[in-house]
Amino acid sequence: MTAQGSLFRPPSRDPALRVGPAGWNYKDWEGIVYPAGAGRSFDPLAYLAEYVDTIEINSSFYAPPRPDDAAAWGRRVRNNPRFRFTAKAWKQLTHDRTDADAAALRADCDQVRRSMAPLSEAGLLGALLVQFPWSFRFNPENLDYLEQVLRGLAGFPLVVEVRHGGWAAPEVGRFLAEHGAGFCNVDQPVIGESLRPGSRVTSRVGYIRLHGRNYANWFREGAGRDARYDYLYSRQEIGQISGLIRKIRQEAEETYAITNNHFRGQALVNAIEILQELDPEPLAVPPSLVAAYPRLAGPNST
């Protein structure tokens, strides 16, 4: 099943800007993002690829996908020639680290490389995101570890996400540029020493991720995934973020804006609104999403 009446953005638009959600396999998207009662033959990935030009792969964070699965994802988006995936690197490299074992780190990097090879070889991998937690602080030890990871994954279009404010130091930008790695700008609840939103570019790939601004649940012990990322950006906030994206586009050859506030399809709502801010051409919107979020039925949607 494909999107009825969907419109790919024509070639006259900026081919280097891609905006889309993080992930596509969410039960709470049924009847909101995806048509209710779509049936077992419905392909959510192919459906989304008719409305957006990028999706960030989340499952690769929990385990490297089988190369056959990655190749299949590529085939499922082939109806949109503008489409590129981004993907999160395996958490074994970032959250469950084995710092003392260089051989294990190389083996883990090799496993990630094999898993992403089908998308990379098909020209469908726009960026590989190496995402570290807030607890990963800017210090010589962690900088050395990061260098090992970047060397282990060299050859891919790498982007590094860090969340602690210490990484805003100027030398971090120089370090990433020397290694050909991009800097992931993050919009997140700004609490204490959290990294502030910005428009930093350190490689040919510009990247920004929107996590929402759910201050009440972001650091609350016991808050589940849905609670943390349950946030719908206002139109005013989307306008501010679009301003950052404009700055990123001026410096980068390719720009990716990923919305991670996935609960109940809010990520796709805000992705479409960013495109509406940045692009005057009419955009197609899934009918079920407009029904759930009437604010999408604006003058530059179809």
Image (spheres, rainbow, N blue to C red):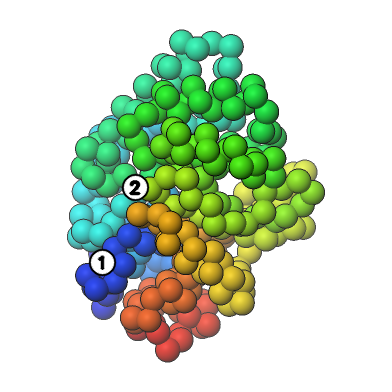
> Quick one: 298 or 176, which is closer to the camera?
176
20 vs 141, nearest the viewer: 141
The quadrant the N terminus occupies is bottom left
Disc 2 vs disc 1: which is toward the camera? 2
Residue beneath the point at 27% across and 47% down: 124
Q: Is residue 174 above or below residue 241?
A: above
Q: Earlier in the sequence, mark 2 or mark 1?
A: 1
Residue closer to the observer: 196 or 9? 196
Q: Secondary structure at mark 1?
A: loop
Helix, strand or loop for disc 2: strand
Placement of the C terminus among the 4 image quadrants:
bottom left
Q: Amino acid at mark 1?
A: Thr
- Residue 126 is tagged as 2
Residue at image coords 34%, 82%: 282
Residue 161 locus on image (x, y percent) = 55, 42
Residue 260 in sight in this render: no
Q: Dot 1 corresponds to which residue?
A: 2
Q: Is residue 117 above or below residue 235?
A: above
Tag 2: amino acid:
Gly
For residue 119, say whether it is visible: yes
Q: Residue furthest bottom?
A: 299
Tally the numbered discs: 2
Classify mark 1: residues with Cα within 10 Å, few (<14), some (14-19) or many (20+): some
In the rendered image, residue 248, in percent from the top left (x then y), is placed at 47, 59
Residue at position x 46%, y 39% in the image: 177
Characterize the local packing of mark 2: few (<14), some (14-19) or many (20 or more) Cα atoms within 10 angstroms. many
Counting from the top left corner in percent of width and height, residue 188 is at: 65, 55
- As measured in the structure, the alpha-carbon distance from the residue carrying label 2 to the one carrying label 1 is 24 Å
Q: Is residue 192 left or right of residue 84?
A: right
Q: At 71% across and 48% down in the image, what residue appears? A: 194
Does 24 appear above or below 103?
below
